[in-house]
Image (cartoon, helix red, strand yellow):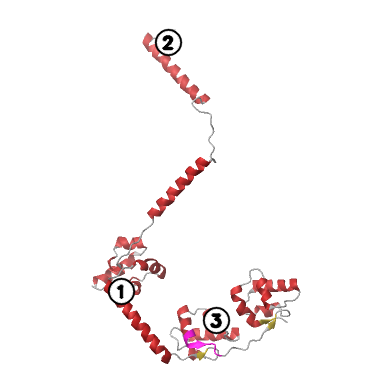
Amino acid sequence: MKLFKSHFWYYKSQRNGIFLLVIIIVLLQSFIVFDWFSSGEKIDAESAEILAFHQQIDSLRLIELENKKLKIYPFNPNYITDYKGERLGMSVAEVNRLLLFRKTGKFINSKEEFQTVTQVSDSLLNAIAPFFKFPDWVVQKQLKKASHTSKYVAINSKTKITVKDINTAIAEDFKTIYGIGDELSERIIKYRSKLQGFSYNNQIFEVWGLEKDVAQKVVLNFKVIEKPVIKKQNVNTVTFSELLKNPYINYELCKKIFEYRDEVAEIQNLTELQHIKDFPLELYDRIVLYLLAE
């Protein structure tokens, strides 16, 4: 009894305080257990108000992302710093090449010179070059130089360019074009044999490994003067392997042509080929060079 009495031996005010604290704890626990503070209303996550709120949040996020993007203003590339170069996407080595060049006291006056000095990629150059801003006197000098060059080419093009038949030219003829050596000249002739002769001037662009600017030079000097005589195949009787020899028909297209031929029994006109699903319409003129319908 003394043990219990020692624990409950408090003054009246202390006992009242303890009882009051117990009552408050019980009431708070009751609120939590029975959720008396809840209004009882369920929130619809798909309601128009909630969806509108989410859309507003998404739009604010997009605006924030747009503001974080790098904004480039016109600048003189001669004064690119380490920080500016990094922001533009240049590597440390590319920036250092520019800084070393500038230490010699020289200036870059064109985007071509900028690429030569820094050795940046074509993709990066195309992205930042539109923002290059050179002094007015540099721009005027470039315009005069370009005008003079174009006039010189126009005056001399009539006398210097001699057009030859691309179907009779030999390897040595093609090697007169800057950028074409032994390998490319032989490749042009092999592709010409595969085609049974060039029927269009722009077929030269189909030669594998031939750069576009080099092919353009070929077209200036070599053209289809006399059309080749191509051995045509009857699309209704040709075999699968024979049709595959057409330089513009692959296995899948060959299969579709045969399926269409079986479906219609006989192809009356070559234009029907264009009705085949996924037929390469841009190659139609090339494909029918080797076909006929009889």
Q: Which residue is mark 2?
A: 3
Range of the magenta residues? 218-225
x 41%, y 54%: residue: 66
Q: Is residue 141 visible?
A: yes
Residue 246 sits in quarter: bottom right
Front in this rendered view, residue 184 or 279: 279
Instruction: Say few, some or many: other residues with alpha carbon within 10 Å of mark 2 (under 14 / 14 to 19 / 20 or more).
Output: few
User: Left or right: where does residue 186 sit relative to residue 255?
Assistant: left
- Determine the image quadrant of residue 90: bottom left
- In the rendered view, does 78 fall on the left or right side of 65? left
Q: Is residue 292 above or below residue 32?
A: below
Q: Amino acid at mark 3?
A: Gln
Quadrant into which the C terminus falls: bottom right
Give the position of the N terminus as an image quadrant: top left
Q: At label 1, which amino acid type do we have?
A: Val
Q: Percent from the top left, x then y, of residue 191?
A: 56, 83
Tell me, for residue 139, which label it has, or none: 1
Q: CA distance from mark 1 to mark 3?
A: 38 Å
Q: Which mark is residue 246?
A: none
Q: Is residue 276 magenta?
A: no
Q: Which residue is mark 3?
A: 203
Say what amino acid the circle numbered 2 marks: Leu
Residue extending farthest to the top is: 1
Q: Give the crowd class for mark 3: few <14, some 14-19, many >=20 residues within 10 Å.
A: some
State which quadrant residue 21 falls in.
Answer: top left
User: Which is in the foreground here, disc 1 or disc 3?
Assistant: 1
Look at the numbered disc 1 and give the secondary structure of its residue. helix
Marks 2 and 3 sit apart, C-alpha to C-alpha, by 111 Å
**Residue drawn 50% across and 91% down?**
164
| Vertical position of residue 17 compared to residue 249: above or below | above
